[in-house]
Amino acid sequence: MKQKKWLISICAMAGLLALCAGVYTVLDPGRGDISGAPVGAPAKSETSGPADSAQPGSDLPDDAFEAASSWVNWSDEEDFYLAALNADKLAVTSVQHLPVFRFETAEELEEFKERFGDYFAMEHSLGELIPSFADITSKMDETYFESRTVFVVYVPSGSGSYRFGVDSVYRDSEALCIHIKETGNPEVYTCDMAGWFVVVSLEKALVEGVTDIDADMNHLQSYAVANIADYLRISAPLPE
């Protein structure tokens, strides 16, 4: 009789252990597969490619573009601002947008010089360190444009003492934005109005498919940069 009770106890304990094991497997199914995949789901394949998904934009590497800046004097000619690729954004005050132009051929660049040559000092240099806009673009001929695209960003400044350059160039599937930054922080500065052309050159392959072009002051307002919207005396987006 005692032997039967002992056998019944062993069977009961075995049944209890099996029940616990089954509950544990349900609560933590991945434990049963060394791949870590849940039961009922296929294990990850080492040869499968990435899932199709929209890729977010990012800043281009610093060595992906070339940039140079030239003092060209200040101008508030309205037709210049209206001709910019991002004219509809220039009245926005939350971000300091800057007029930007795009050139795919040497002919387009020359037309820009002729059209706005009376507004800016394109052939004026500041000593040996700051070349003129004409000097910066002098070698941009048809051969140059076979592989390069050129952008020109105009930076109006409330002082001729400030200097500007490229902080970064952002690119996503259809948009490109050139972020401009102040490259100096003078303790003493003049109160004269000034303006700069920041010239940015990239390989055509890097801007293929780009249809939305913009430029701004490093995502922030700058005390050195003049407010374009105020100069144009507008409170609504510019007409196309």
Image (spheres, rainbow, N blue to C red):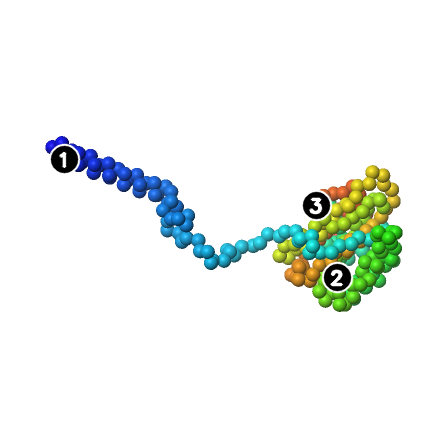
For image coordinates 40% across by 53% down, the residue present is 42
**Do tag 2 and tag 1 residues touch (Cβ < 8 Å)?**
no
Q: What element does badge 3 sit on?
A: loop
Camera-nearest residue between 6 and 227: 6
Q: Which image quarter holds the N terminus?
A: top left
Disc on the earlier residue, 3 or 1: 1
Amino acid on which the number 3 mark rests in the picture = His
Q: Which residue is mark 3?
A: 219
Q: Which image quarter holds the C terminus?
A: bottom right
Label 2 crowd (10 A; few <14 / some 14-19 / many >=20):
some
Q: Is residue 204 left or right of residue 21?
A: right
Q: CA distance from mark 3 to mark 1?
A: 83 Å
For image coordinates 69% across by 62% down, the residue present is 204
Tell me the number on the disc at residue 4: 1
Disc on the earlier residue, 2 or 1: 1
Q: Is residue 174 above or below residue 236?
A: below
Q: Is residue 226 left or right of residue 1?
A: right
Amino acid on which the number 1 mark rests in the picture = Lys
